[in-house]
Amino acid sequence: MLSYKAIYVIVLREFKRFFRQKGRLVVTLARPLIWLFIVGSGFTKLIDIDTGVNYIQFILPGIVGMTILFSSIFSTISVVWDREFGFLREMLVSPVSRVTIVFGKLLSGTALSVFQGAALLLIAPLLHLNVGISEYIIMIFLMFLVALSITALGLFVASFLTSLEGFNVIMNFIVLPMFFLSGALYPVNSLPPFIKMFTYINPLCFGVDSFKHILLPEGGRLVAEFPLYVDIIFISVFSVLFTFLSALVFERRK
Amino acid sequence: MPIIKVENLVKRYNSVEAVRGVSFEVNEGETFGFLGPNGAGKTTTINILCTLLNFDSGIALVNGFDCRKEAHKVRSSIGLVFQEITLDNELTAYENLKFHCYMYNMEKRLSEERIDEILGVVGLRDRKNDLVRKFSGGMKRRLEIARGLLHRPKVLFLDEPTLGLDPQTRAHVWEFIKKLKKTEGNTVFMTTHYMQEAEACDRIAIIDNGQIIACAKPDDLKRNLRGDTIYIKTSDDERAQVEIQEKFGLKAKKLETGLAVLVESGEKCIPKLFEKLETNILSINLKKPSLEDVFINLTGKEIREYGPSTRFTKVGN
């Protein structure tokens, strides 16, 4: 049912496109650095920290999460893009199954996100965070899960859309709330209860939380809020569910 | 056994019937043309045959496989060139072709061979590592057709292959399609609304309003029409119309400017017109039957507003 050759070439194509679109490359690299060093250092002076984790360190897991969020969601644009520019039909009319195309898109979005997250993590030592080889490897695994869950969600949404305009509208109602309700910039425990509810359905919230487990030292106010296993279970379930849903929607639509 | 077999095909969009009980067969090696105005159901039919669209009832077989139940087998048997360009602009010509080879699970060595060969045929070998974005419309078309042929499909579907191209490029692409047919020998199924392109097909089906109204060799269709059309302009068309009716027993149809008369032999009739008509003739024009006339005759309307001949409406038989 799955053609691995086709999945490989779909992923390869997305990577080629990614490195060829210089503007996208620059934005992708610059955005997290702006957040970290401009927003982060601004608030570091403002927020008094009593736990040995300062604000700029605190937001690194969140900014890794943000990088994955943006990258994953916007890589699913390629489905809408391909539909608008016809390339999707080249794929749909080939003998590979629909599921193969979904997996190809899913994997390319995920791989691109992990790649960007991993690149960003290289600056952790600059922030005086102790990230060794083993933490780095665990982070790659966690980033893969988080990227998969968000790409699957994006793909599911994108498969309903026919134009790029619609994509922008819907994504801004999903991307920004997901980011602000992820605990990336402030602990979700400090949110009022009726807003906090939404964090429990947000895969990025559990994702950022799992990153905090690995990247930040234990103890204090500004650290992980859920047990790591809860994070992993939630993200995994979310990934599987939306992979299944997007495959289903893709199969139905012609 | 025919390579394409369609029987009583029906496709509805909501309550509108886009294809209304279409039946035809295409033989192996044939160039089969689907001729009709925009919105006649050409693309819908092609999309059904390419498994991109479900249909409501009827039979659609390609290469002996059912388009609904054996979609992936049908897809392995066909190559498709769409109306719009479906190349990836961010990839090179070579990469676009390579992508296709992977999707069709072609062996590495074979695909390299085929890519090189087909790039030679379409005359793009020296541009193979250029981004498609830099290509002209004609070059993109050629590359698309090359891509459609890469996996040696049994049937090549061309949906308006020359749409949006300038006349020169159009002629070029068409010449190229003919050349390919000689070297590749596959069946070509194409839709078009250009008469000149339809003339070059082995057989054509004229489709209008979701129904096939004629299906035969272009020459046979023209032969059926029997007769030439004479277009005349006179100083007083109304008087001339009456005169022609009285003196020749022919019915002249009044057009925006001038008259159109359907006669058996135009060459013989023109001298008589000059001889007997008392109204001053300003200009006279003889037209041998073309597919355009066949089309107008069958559907009662012009296929599109293009060229001098279509300014006139044909007189019914």
Image (spheres, coloured by chain):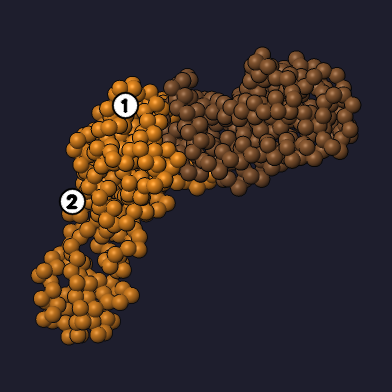
Residue A172 position, x and y percent, is: 69, 42
Residue B106 occupies quadrant? top left
Looking at the rendered structure, the secondary structure element under dot 1 is: helix
Name the one closer to the observer, A5 or B125. B125
Q: Residue at x 28, y 40 (%)?
A: B126
Name the one closer to the observer, A54 or B37. A54
Whether residue B187 sits left or right of residue A240 in the image: it is left
Q: Chain of mark 2?
A: B
Q: Judge whether residue B256 can be spotted in this image.
A: yes
Q: Nearer the viewer, mark 2 or mark 1?
A: 1
3D distance between C-alphas at marks 2 and 1: 40 Å
Residue B132 position, x and y percent, is: 39, 43
Q: Chain of mark 1?
A: B
The vertical placement of A3 against A63, above or below, is above
Residue B211 position, x and y percent, is: 37, 47
Q: Do tag 2 and tag 1 residues touch (Cβ < 8 Å)?
A: no
Residue A151 position, x and y percent, is: 62, 30
Residue B111 occupies quadrant? top left
Q: Residue at x 27, y 58 (%)?
A: B292
Whether residue A29 sits left or right of residue B213 in the image: it is right
Residue A171 occupies quadrant? top right
In the rendered image, which residue does mark 1 sit on?
Answer: B111
Looking at the rendered structure, the secondary structure element under dot 2 is: helix
In the rendered image, which residue does mark 2 sit on?
Answer: B219
N-terminal of the pair, mark 2 or mark 1, is 1
The vertical placement of B200 against B308, above or below, is above
Q: Which chain is orange?
A: B
Q: Amino acid at mark 2?
A: Asp
Q: Which chain is brown?
A: A
